[in-house]
Image (tube, grey):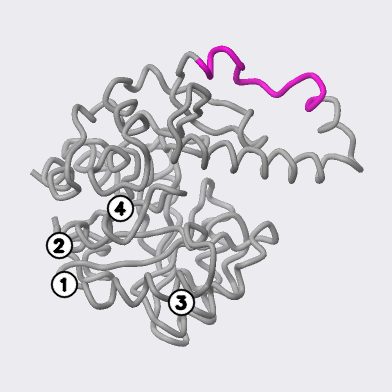
Amino acid sequence: MQTKLTQLLNIKYPIIQAPMFLVSNTAMVIEAMKGGIAGCIPALNYRTLDELRAAIKELKAAKVEGGSFGFNLIVNKSNIKYKGQLEVLCEEGCDFIITSLGSPEETIRQAHAVGIKVFCDVTDLKFAQKVESLGADAAIAVNNEAGGHRGNYSPEELIKLLTSNLKIPVISAGGVGCKADIDKMIGYGAEGVSVGSPFIASVEANVTDEYKQACVDYGAKDIVMTQRISGTPCTVINTPYVQKIGTKESWLESVLNKNKKLKKWVKMIRFSIGMRATENAATKATYKTVWVAGPSIEYTKAILPTKDIIAKLVH
C-alpha cells in the first residue's frame, strides 16, 4: 500500500486518522502512529495555547517509525485563535497541518519555512487549483459521504476531477469504513484516505459511551443532513431527538438568513449555539443529543481499541 502519501509522511499505510472536533486526542493519535498511519487533531480541541503546546510535546515524545502526526487549523476569521495556534505549531513542530474553511496562504508560507507539510480540505476543482497554486503539498478531497460538513460530489467524481487537473496528490475524505473502500478510492486515483467516523467508537476517543454505542447501533441509512447545528448542512445520526426537532432551519432562522444585514450575525450565533450543543452531546449523556457522524459507521460493530480499527482497515 505504498503511495505518494506514504512517501510524504513516511507512514506504512496511506491513511490519515481524520481530525474530529471533541473526539480526537493524543491517545488516539499515539495508537494511530503505532499502527503505521498518520493521526490528526483539531487545534480547537485545546482551549489554550499552552494545552496545544503540551499535546505537541507529548506526541513528539511518543512518535514511532512509520507513524506521523499533525493538526487541523480553521484558517478563517471565525477562529480567533488561528494565528496563535499556527505560531505554536511552527515553534514546536509537527509533520503536517490540515487547513479548513479559508485561505491557507499564510499557513503554507509559515509551515513550509520550518519544514511542515500542508494539506488543504477542498470540495471542488476551483479551490483545489487555488491551494495548489499557493503551494499546498496535497489536496484533501471532501466528498458527499464524509461525516460532518461534507462536499457535493461523490468520491469517484471528485477524485477523478481533481487527479485529472492537479499535479499534487489527492487524498480522499469520506465513505471509508473498510479495506475494500480504501482499495476503491485508490483505484479511482487517490494517493490515500482520511478516515474519521469509524474512530468515534474507539476506546481512546474523548466522547461518552452513549455516543460510541450509537455508532455501533446505527448505520449508513440512519445518517441525515441537518441545518440545526451550525446553520450549514451537517451529517448526524437520526436519533429520536433529531427526528423530534427536525433537520430544517426554523421559520425565524429562515427569515433572518434572508436579511443581508442580519445574516452574518445569525450564522455566528447559530454556530456558537451549535458548537455548545455538539460539545454537550459528546461529553454528557442526555436524551437531547445530536451526534455527528458519517455513513461509514455502517462497518462499526463494536467499541474497539484504535489499533483494532486500524487492523480492520488495512487487512
Q: How far is mark 3 from mark 2, CA to CA?
A: 22 Å
Q: In which quarter of the image is residue 15?
A: bottom left
> Which amino acid type is marked by label 3?
Leu
Residue at the spot of label 3: 89
Distance (Cα) linking label 4 and label 3? 19 Å
The extreme front residue here reads: 285
Q: What element carries label 4?
A: strand
- Disc 2 packing (10 Å; few <14; some 14–19; many ≥20): many
Where does label 4 land, which residue? 17
Q: Is residue 150 within the magenta segment?
A: no
In the rendered structure, which disc, 4 or 2, sits on the residue that comes first in sequence?
A: 4
246 in the magenta segment: yes
> Where is residue 103, by image quadrant?
bottom right
Characterize the magenta stretch by its predominant secondary structure: helix
Task: In this rendered view, identify the residue nearer to me: 62 or 184.
Answer: 62
Proximity of marks 3 and 1: CB atoms separated by less than 8 Å: no
Q: Which of marks 3 and 1 is nearer the N terminus?
A: 1
Distance from label 3 to label 1 (Cα)? 19 Å
| Amino acid found under the numbered disc labelled 2 | Lys
SS assignment at label 2: helix
Q: In the rendering, which numbered label is found on residue 34?
A: 2
